[in-house]
């Protein structure tokens, strides 16, 4: 099971923070309580920084260089994030 999820965007401010909040809500709704969720800039995306990376689909290729990555078509869609997170966690 993943222990850390990093949400990232180009600047590490607005969009990544929204994805972090949505990821925390999604994990709670899925009954997952032992995963740390953080948001950051693309500069912090590197192997070992997290078990799963979450970003917009346009940056997915950058995350995949570091590890398992979820690319979102709609970065503020809680429903899309919940579905993709459920799949990534094997729930």
Image (cartoon, grey):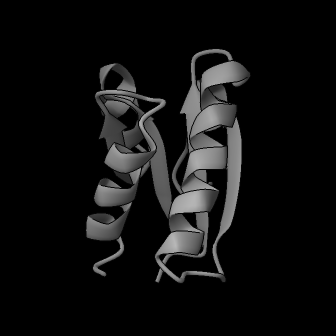
**Residue at 46 percent of width and 58 percent of height:** 52
Q: Is residue 51 left or right of residue 13?
A: left
Residue 33 pos. (x, y %): 65, 82
Q: Nearer the viewer, residue 1 or 76?
A: 76
Residue 1 pos. (x, y %): 46, 84
Q: Quadrant of residue 56?
A: top left
Residue 50 pos. (x, y %): 58, 58
Q: Is residue 23 left or right of residue 52?
A: right
Placement of 45 over or under 22, stated as above or below: above
Q: Quadrant of residue 58?
A: top left
Q: Is residue 49 left or right of residue 26?
A: right
Residue 81 pos. (x, y %): 39, 48
**Residue at 66 percent of width and 82 percent of height:** 34
**Residue at 36 percent of width and 48 percent of height:** 79
Q: Quadrant of residue 43?
A: top right
Q: Nearer the viewer, residue 21 or 7?
A: 21
Q: In the rendered view of the protein, which quadrant contains the C terminus?
A: bottom left
Placement of 76 over or under 24, stated as above or below: above
Q: Nearer the viewer, residue 7 or 68?
A: 7
Question: How many numbered discs, if any?
Answer: 0
Placement of 17 over or under 87, stated as above or below: above
One can see residue 75 in this view: yes
Placement of 54 over or under 12, stated as above or below: below
One can see residue 50 in this view: no
**Residue at 63 percent of width and 34 percent of height:** 18
């Amino acid at each position: 099971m993943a222990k850390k999820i990093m949400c990232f965007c180009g600047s590490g401010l607005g969009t990544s923070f929204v994805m972090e909040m949505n990821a925390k809500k999604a994990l709670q709704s899925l009954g997952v309580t032992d995963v740390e969720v953080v948001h950051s800039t693309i500069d912090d995306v590197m192997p070992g920084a997290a078990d799963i990376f979450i970003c917009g689909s346009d940056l997915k290729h950058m995350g995949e260089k570091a590890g398992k990555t979820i690319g979102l078509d709609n970065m503020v869609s809680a429903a899309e994030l919940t579905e993709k997170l459920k799949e990534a966690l094997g729930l």
